[in-house]
């Protein structure tokens, strides 16, 4: 499992881990039932704090992406397709919100923004 941490990102390290593992699960790169590295192993591989990996795994479990079992480890949870779709919508809304904010600051009208989106979508 390749997770890339960027020191240039505004996101904290634990959130970068969460987002990348979620993306791997949503794309099918990580299959239901597949074991994740132990928190300690991931922390050692990435040279980060065990507390950081623990926080990432706890958030993934809270969001319903993984299941953790004491003494066995953490595994990709079988996903409800509706939950995956909802997560995709949430991520899309976040990106569109940023684009809308930039468009407003730049004086781009809604019709122009919709035109840009339509062009990008059709490519």
Image (spheres, rainbow, N blue to C red):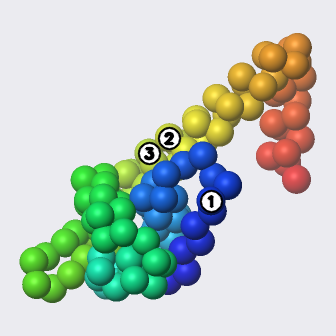
- The alpha-carbon separation of the residues under discs 2 and 1 comes to 25 Å
Q: Which residue is mark 3?
A: 86
- Residue 116 appears left or right of 82: right
Q: Are marks 3 and 2 in contact (CB under 8 Å)?
A: yes
The relative height of residue 89 versus residue 101 in the rendered view (above or below) is below
Q: Which residue is mark 2?
A: 90
Q: Are marks 1 and 3 in contact (CB under 8 Å)?
A: no
The relative height of residue 107 versus residue 7 in the rendered view (above or below) is above
Residue 116, given in percent of the width and then of the height, sits at 87, 34
**Residue at 10% across / 77% down in the picture?**
70
Residue 47, given in percent of the width and then of the height, sits at 46, 78
Q: Quadrant of residue 50?
A: bottom left
Q: Quadrant of residue 96?
A: top right
The relative height of residue 113 versus residue 91 in the rendered view (above or below) is above
Q: Which residue is mark 1?
A: 7
Label 3 sits on a secondary structure element that is helix
**Residue at 89% across / 41% down in the picture?**
119
- Name the N-terminal-most of marks 2 and 1: 1
């Amino acid at each position: 499992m390749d997770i890339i941490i960027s020191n240039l990102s505004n996101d904290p390290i634990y959130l970068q881990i969460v987002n990348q593992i979620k993306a791997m699960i949503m794309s099918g790169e990580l299959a239901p039932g597949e074991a994740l590295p132990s928190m300690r192993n991931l922390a050692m591989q990435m040279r980060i704090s065990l507390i950081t990996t623990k926080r990432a795994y706890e958030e993934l479990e809270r969001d319903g992406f993984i299941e953790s079992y004491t003494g066995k480890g953490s595994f990709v949870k079988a996903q409800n397709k509706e939950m995956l779709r909802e997560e995709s919508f949430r991520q899309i809304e976040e990106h569109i919100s940023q684009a809308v904010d930039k468009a407003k600051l730049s004086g781009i009208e809604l019709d122009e923004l919709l035109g840009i989106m339509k062009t990008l979508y059709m490519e």
